[in-house]
Image (cartoon, rainbow, N blue to C red):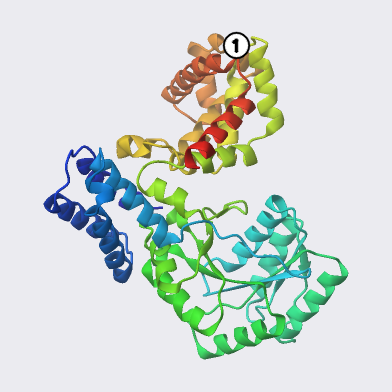
């Protein structure tokens, strides 16, 4: 998300960063470029206008003009206003209610609502340690009910059956009664979607809302619809008291207009973003972290949290012990590291969060992708255990056999071996320290810097 905007803003703000003095002229030129970048990212015009006005006002004020490095100060102002537009801080779910807390999910057909119900159930179970039940009130689409049942079974969430001969209110009321008997903490309710907002849909969901009185009513919307996502959320909010928005398909959205428009237009916070198709690809929305990513400053806190949550601790500790004992880092260890990277959402998800990644030329960034990661894993999997332990054995005919075994070219095998040698050198630097402690130290430093 925000690839195009980040590139545009990066070039614009780079020009002003080194300026010893800011004038009305160079501020005006910079803000004109920022304005164009935001409009191209499909940010709604009222949002762009308000944003530029606030940045201009602060840029011409004492805070920037009398700073020792006014160019840097202007970038800080842009970052602060980006955070302000998106909602200052992460707003978590309010689950303070007599169990079960009810979460009602609303949205148009095709926004990814049913998948988001399952993702949210998984997140609540794993991150918040809640017992979760799910129910579908979509009596018009049996396929959606079946999809939710399959996902719930895969994730060990409690699934409540839907009797399509009943009304949505009857189905959900029965599910909540069962959830109380089972002492569940949360029930997430999937509702029927339409291709557009219509009176029938609104009447049904209003009746359901009134009957079950949910603690959270979340609107699920496709980020790829840009500023239309914000307008749809506003129309929905006028009929239903929304408590927040879940933005889906952000991994396929290079513009990001929805994320920057929704809070301003609806007054409702974005609570979660969907960042991929798998059921673990749902993240709480942090405006401050996203603002840093938009400006090419990276998001190390999210990256470290990903590492803590998704890296296999046992394997990481085993590798750390092995290195501390002076045993070398071999290809078996390397393939484990590549697989852990896959578990964290792949290379793309990690690169977005690295500071300064925008300084790397785009054509080079494009070469580092998840297909390349899968190819590297396939190459190493084609080696014998002896070859993985002793990479120096891999020469001539062995290379040919490995390439043939995984359907790759000889140059692919050479590339993997070269990358392994680089990783091996890096791992020697870690031999004296415990990786887990090192990660905790980085995280502590990051928090200290933010405070």
Asked whether, in this view, residue 442 is left or right of residue 84, the answer is: right
Image position, residue 430 (x, y; %): 56, 18
Q: Nearer the viewer, residue 158 or 436?
A: 436
Q: Position of residue 367 (x, y in %)?
A: 38, 36
**On screen, 397 above or below 95?**
above
Where residue 405 sits in the image (x, y, percent)?
A: 56, 27
Examine the image and state in which quarter residue 173 appears: bottom right
Residue located at (41% from left, 55% from top): 83
Q: Is residue 39 visible?
A: no
Compared with 213, 422 (above or below) is above
Judging from the image, what secondary structure is the residue with disc 1 in?
loop
Residue at 55% x, 38% y: name it: 304
Residue 317 in the figure: left or right of residue 382: right
**Camera sees residue 389:** yes
Q: Residue furthest right?
A: 181
- Between residue 186 and residue 138, name the one nearer to us: 186
Residue farthest left in this picture = 25
Residue closer to the observer: 56 or 442: 56
228 versus 372 height, above or below: below
User: How crowded is the residue under tag 1: few (<14 C-alpha within 10 Å), some, or many (20+)?
Assistant: few
Left or right of 311, for residue 159: right
Which residue bears the numbered disc 1? 390
Residue 346: percent from left, percent from top: 52, 41
């Amino acid at each position: 998300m925000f690839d195009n905007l980040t590139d545009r803003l990066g070039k614009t703000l780079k020009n002003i960063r080194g300026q010893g003095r800011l004038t009305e002229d160079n501020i005006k030129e910079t803000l004109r470029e920022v304005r164009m970048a935001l409009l191209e990212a499909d940010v709604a015009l009222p949002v762009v206008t308000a944003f530029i006005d606030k940045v201009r006002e602060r840029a011409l004020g004492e805070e920037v003009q009398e700073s020792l490095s006014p160019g840097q100060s202007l970038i800080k102002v842009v970052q602060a206003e980006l955070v302000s537009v998106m909602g200052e801080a992460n707003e978590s779910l309010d689950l303070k209610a007599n169990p079960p807390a009810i979460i009602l999910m609303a949205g148009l057909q095709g926004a990814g609502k049913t998948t988001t119900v399952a993702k949210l159930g998984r997140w609540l179970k794993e991150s918040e340690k809640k017992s979760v039940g799910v129910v579908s009130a979509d009596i018009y689409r049996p396929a959606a009910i079946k999809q939710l049942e399959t996902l719930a079974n895969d994730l060990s969430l409690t699934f409540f059956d839907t009797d399509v001969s009943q009304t949505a209110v009857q189905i959900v009321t029965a599910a909540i009664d069962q959830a109380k008997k089972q002492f569940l903490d949360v029930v997430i309710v999937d509702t029927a979607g339409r291709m557009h907002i219509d009176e029938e849909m609104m009447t049904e969901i209003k009746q359901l809302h009134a009957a079950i009185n949910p603690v959270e009513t979340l609107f699920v919307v496709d980020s790829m619809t840009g500023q239309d996502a914000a307008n749809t959320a506003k129309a929905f909010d006028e009929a239903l008291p929304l408590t927040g928005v879940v933005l889906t398909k952000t991994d396929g959205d290079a513009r990001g207009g929805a994320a920057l428009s929704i809070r301003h237009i609806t007054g409702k916070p974005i609570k979660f973003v969907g960042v991929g198709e798998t059921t673990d690809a749902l993240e709480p929305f942090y405006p401050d972290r996203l603002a840093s990513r938009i400006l090419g400053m990276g998001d190390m806190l999210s990256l470290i949290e990903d590492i803590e949550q998704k890296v296999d601790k046992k394997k990481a500790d085993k590798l750390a012990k092995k290195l501390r004992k002076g045993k070398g880092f071999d290809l078996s260890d390397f393939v484990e590291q590549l697989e852990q990277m896959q578990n964290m959402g792949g290379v793309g998800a990690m690169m977005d969060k690295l500071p300064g990644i925008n300084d790397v030329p785009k054509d080079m960034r494009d070469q580092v992708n998840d297909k390349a990661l899968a190819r590297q894993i396939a190459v190493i999997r084609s080696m014998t255990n002896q070859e993985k332990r002793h990479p120096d054995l891999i020469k001539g005919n062995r290379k040919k056999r490995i390439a043939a075994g995984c359907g790759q070219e000889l140059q692919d095998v050479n590339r993997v071996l070269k990358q392994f040698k680089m990783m091996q050198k890096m791992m020697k630097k870690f031999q004296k320290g415990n990786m887990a402690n090192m990660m905790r130290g980085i995280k502590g430093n990051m928090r200290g810097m933010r405070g």
